Structures are given as C-alpha cells and as structure tokens.
Image (cartoon, rainbow, N blue to C red):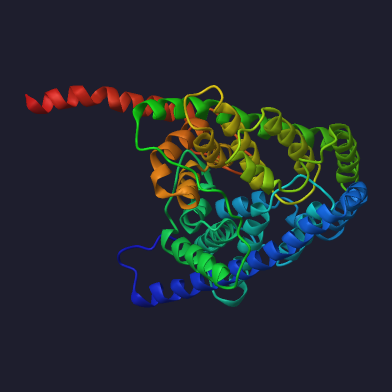
C-alpha cells in the first residue's frame, strides 16, 4: 500500500515499526549467514579434496527440499509471485533451508552466489510479521519488498541499492515506488545494524574514476552491449540446464546429484579450481589486473550448471564475477581504463540479468564512489536493453517490452523540436 499524503500519524508510526523489524531481521540473518559462509569458504580452501563429495551433498539438498520444502523451492521467484498475487504467508522454514543449502553448496565447491540467499531470508522473515499483526494483501506486498531489499542491501553493504531493489525486481520495464518509505527504513536499518555487529562485507580495491568525458561515455555504452549479451547467455544457459534436467529426470534429488557429478568432472578437466565457490579473490584481482576472456566464459558455464541443477546460493556474485572479468578484459580493446570497465561490469551484468538497472547503478556508486554514477548509468541501462526481455527471475512480469520503451523515448525526443517551435509561435 502506497503511503498517501493523507496517511495519519499512527499509520506512519505503525509502518516505521514494521520496517524497523524487517531491517533488524534482515541484518541479523545476513550477518550470521556471511560469517558462516566465510567459514565454509575457508574450510573448502584448506581442504580442497572435499569437493569430491559435491554430488552427495547435492542429493542431500535436493532430498531435503523434495521432502520438506516443495512449497519454498521456487526461492526468489516465490517471493516475486507473492508480491504480484499475495496468497499465503511464506513458510518460516525458507530461511533455515536456504541458509543450510547455500552453506553446503559453497562448502563443497558449488559455483554459486550468496545475495539471493540473503534476499530469501530477509523476505521470509519479514513476512512472519503477518502472523502477529493484522495486515491485508497489499500490506504484505510492502513487507515482502522491504524484507527482500533489506536482505540485498545488508549482504552487499549498499543500502540505497537495497531500497530500490525490492521494488524494481518485481516488473520488467517499470519501477513502482509503492513501498519507498518502508524499503528506505528497512534497508538502512539492516545496513547500519549489520555494520555495527561486524558483518564481514567484502572489500573491493578502489577504482580511479575519470572526470566526465563524452568519449569515455561512448566507449562505456559500447561495453554495455557485451555486458548485456553476457547476462542473456548466462540466463539462457541456466534455464536450459534446468529445463533439460526437468525433461529427463523425474526425481528431483537426482538433479543436483547428476549436476554435481558433471561439475566435479569439469572442475577436474579445467584443473585450476578457480571457479569454485564465490570467486571473490578473482573479482578483486580483475579490478587491479587485466583479466583474460576465458574467466567469464568458464564462470558462466560452472555457475549455470550449479544453479540450474538445483544447488542453492543465487547468481549475484557469479554475475559480478562474469561482469568484472569481462569488463577487465574489454579494456584491451576499448580506450578506457580496464579497472573502470571492470567496476562497470561488476554492476551492469547483474543489473541486466536481474532487470534492475537502477538499483545496480546505485550499487556501483555506493561501492566505487558517487563519481562513477554517469558511467554506471549508461553501462547498466545499455546492458539492460541488450539482455533480452527475460532474466534470471522467471516470475518477473513484463510491464513493457524493452524495444518498445526505447522507441517511445526516441519518439518523445523527436517531438521535442516540434513542440519547441510550436511554443515559440
């Protein structure tokens, strides 16, 4: 429910309280999750042979969800569906299920992300408020959007991006600010509380941002095209894996089992184990040293196979990996600093795959400095328009096709001179 100018003071107090609770839940969940995930990553790096158990772990994750979590298996898509059409409260077990599934995926070497887990935990915990307070269907939408955004912002350390993400992710081609007040309070509460209690946010090397320059802006727009194509190819491949397994495998726990077998075979053939887990060191490296083009290609393959087979964790950090290494490599061809292109790819590829270019533009500014804003805006929106209509979240509704929106903007721009001369006459 959008807070109208006529809303009463008790209304604001009530929703401030709800938003604070959402933020607190998200901060505590995200902080605990990040600590445990760091432990899982460090443990795997100290014991690399543990990766050979990945197929058995995949079967266990699949079995747990098949037996006890069928109604939460859709993950982020379930949250988006509930925002579109509220039916019933998301079961509380979504939070511990996705937490355990993600930690196990990373502990044994699956190439997955983490922020998707924080989004699910934040939204499912926020939705529990509906158990204790009388809220209607429209108010549940607010709780879900605020919880999802707060989880996203707390995990990344980007509260402005978190505020927008929970509302932008619902539709393709439209941003409805129906819950801006609640998302603002929840996201900033989650961020500051997570920071206060010492959540281990990732540090990224600083990037030198040039002064605004139209020539650089042109090259950034050109770079946005491969960023968008990379997002589209990742989405298509992950959905292809999921669809193919669904066609030939009827017993769900076998999907991550077979996916795990394929993963360890390809990890062994590739040889470096560079693409297991999150890959944070590679992202940091790409921001300070030019990357090779095989990095985003391999990461696309391994992550699509991981998440498409039913392992848990989400796609954010892998898409950041793909975008950062791709941008770093593109610096060889474009007359732009490789580190600037890496930072732009960091935001643009996920923004294109998730159809959230505004949130990711803000994220780039929060992580790399506000000066990157104009370049991030162009990179994120160019990638967004070149990534196709569908993204990693199947439940997003297409409000307006992207090419139609561009044509509408161009038509409006074309009318400006005519309107100007008419006004003069």
The percent coordinates of residue 79 (x first, y second) are: 62, 54
**Quadrant placement of the C terminus:** top left
Q: Is residue 185 above or below residue 84?
A: below
In the rendered structure, the answer to whether residue 20 lies left or right of residue 314 reads left
The residue sitting at 49% across, 59% down in the picture is 159
Foreground pick, 77 / 383: 383
Q: Is residue 422 above or below residue 188?
A: above
Foreground pick, 115 / 287: 287
Is residue 394 among the parts visible in the rendering? no
Q: Residue furthest left?
A: 425
How many labels sit on residues?
0
Foreground pick, 222 / 402: 222
The percent coordinates of residue 183 (x first, y second) are: 47, 61
Foreground pick, 176 / 328: 328
In the rendered structure, the answer to whether residue 95 lies left or right of residue 126 reads right
Q: Is residue 115 above or below residue 344?
A: below
Is residue 342 among the parts visible in the rendering? yes
Q: Residue furthest front?
A: 289
The residue sitting at 53% across, 40% down in the picture is 343
The residue sitting at 20% across, 23% down in the picture is 417
The percent coordinates of residue 328 (x first, y second) are: 58, 33
**In terms of image quadrants, where is residue 375?**
top left
**Quadrant placement of the N terminus:** bottom left
The percent coordinates of residue 297 (x first, y second) are: 71, 30
């Amino acid at each position: 429910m959008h807070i109208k100018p006529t809303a009463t003071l008790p209304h604001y107090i009530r929703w401030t309280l709800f938003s604070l609770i959402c933020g607190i839940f998200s901060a505590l969940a995200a902080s605990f999750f990040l600590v445990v995930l760091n432990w899982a990553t460090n443990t795997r790096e100290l014991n690399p042979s543990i990766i050979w158990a990945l197929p058995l772990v995949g079967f266990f994750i699949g079995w747990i969800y098949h037996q006890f979590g069928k109604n939460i298996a859709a993950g982020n898509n379930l949250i988006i569906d509930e925002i579109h059409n509220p039916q019933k409260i998301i079961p509380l077990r979504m939070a511990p299920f996705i937490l355990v599934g993600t930690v196990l995926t990373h502990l044994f070497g699956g190439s997955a992300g983490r922020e998707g887990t924080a989004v699910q935990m934040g939204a499912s915990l926020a939705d529990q408020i509906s158990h204790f307070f009388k809220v209607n269907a429209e108010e549940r939408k607010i709780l879900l959007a605020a919880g999802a955004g707060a989880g996203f912002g707390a995990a990344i350390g980007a509260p402005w991006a978190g505020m927008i993400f929970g509302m932008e992710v619902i539709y393709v081609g439209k941003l409805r600010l129906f819950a801006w007040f609640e998302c603002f309070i929840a996201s900033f509460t989650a961020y500051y509380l997570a920071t206060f209690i010492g959540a281990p946010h990732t540090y990224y090397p600083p990037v030198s941002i040039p002064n605004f320059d139209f020539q650089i802006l042109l090259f950034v727009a050109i770079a946005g095209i491969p960023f968008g194509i990379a997002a589209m190819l990742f989405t298509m491949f992950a959905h292809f894996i999921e669809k193919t397994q669904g066609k030939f495998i009827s017993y769900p726990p076998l999907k991550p089992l077979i996916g795990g077998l394929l993963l360890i075979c390809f990890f062994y053939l590739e040889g470096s184990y560079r693409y297991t887990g999150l890959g944070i060191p590679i992202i940091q490296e790409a921001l300070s040293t030019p990357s090779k083009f095989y990095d985003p290609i391999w990461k696309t393959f391994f992550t699509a196979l991981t998440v498409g087979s039913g392992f848990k964790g989400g796609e954010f950090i892998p898409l950041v990996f793909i975008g950062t290494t791709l941008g770093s490599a593109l610096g060889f061809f474009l007359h732009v600093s490789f580190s600037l292109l890496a930072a732009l790819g960091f935001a643009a590829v996920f923004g294109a795959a998730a159809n959230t270019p505004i949130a990711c533009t803000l994220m780039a500014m929060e992580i790399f400095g506000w000066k990157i804003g104009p370049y991030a805006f162009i990179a994120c929106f160019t990638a967004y328009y070149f990534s196709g209509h569908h993204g990693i979240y199947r439940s997003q509704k297409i409000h307006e096709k992207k090419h139609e929106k561009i044509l509408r903007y161009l038509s409006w721009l074309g009318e400006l001179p005519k309107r100007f001369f008419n006004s003069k006459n």
